[in-house]
Image (cartoon, rainbow, N blue to C red):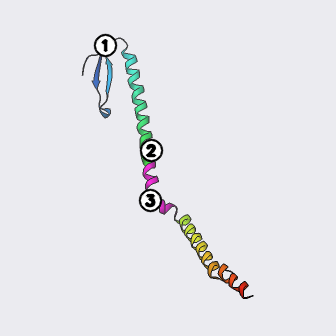
Amino acid sequence: MGEGTHGVVEAHVEHRGTTRAVETDGTGGERVNALGREITEVRERLDTLVDELDRRRHAALDWRGQLRRHALGLAMTALGLAALVGAGLALRAGPFSASRTRRRFRRG
């Protein structure tokens, strides 16, 4: 703690180890107090925002939670992909496949 210019002293406060200016000669103390209150309010709003962002980050990166929330969509997507692959394999090996069609026309 040291004395600054114009009778202002830095004082340690409990909130997260920061320092604040405190008027020592009685002039402008109200302004210093108002600034201190404003800083405290802004800090509290920022704390709330950081906490909310942290909560959202945890929710977004929780893959187990994402699986629980989107299980139906994931199951339907897997079923659709399986049907698409199955249809592709069936067409490739079925009566209309390119290799069977070519053989049929060569015999023709």
Circle 3 residues within 10 Å: few <14, some 14–19, many ≥20:
few
Image side of residue 34 versus residue 75, left or right: left
Of residue 104 and residue 34, the one placed in the foreground of this image is: 104
Assign a secondary structure to mark 1. Answer: helix
Quadrant of the frame with the N terminus: top left
- Which three-letter amino acid code belongs to the residue tagged 2? Leu
Q: Residue at x 43, y 31 (%)?
A: 42
Residue 90 is situated, as x and y percent measured from the top left of the image, at 62, 80
- Which three-letter amino acid code belongs to the residue tagged 1? Thr
Task: Residue under label 1, please give it.
Answer: 5
Task: Residue under label 2, please give it.
Answer: 53
- Which three-letter amino acid code belongs to the residue tagged 3? Trp
Above or below, comparing residue 98 to residue 64 in the picture: below
Assign a secondary structure to mark 2. Answer: helix
Q: Which residues are magenta?
A: 56-70
Examine the image and state in which quarter residue 44 appears: top left
Most extreme residue toward the bottom is 107
Image side of residue 81 versus residue 5, left or right: right
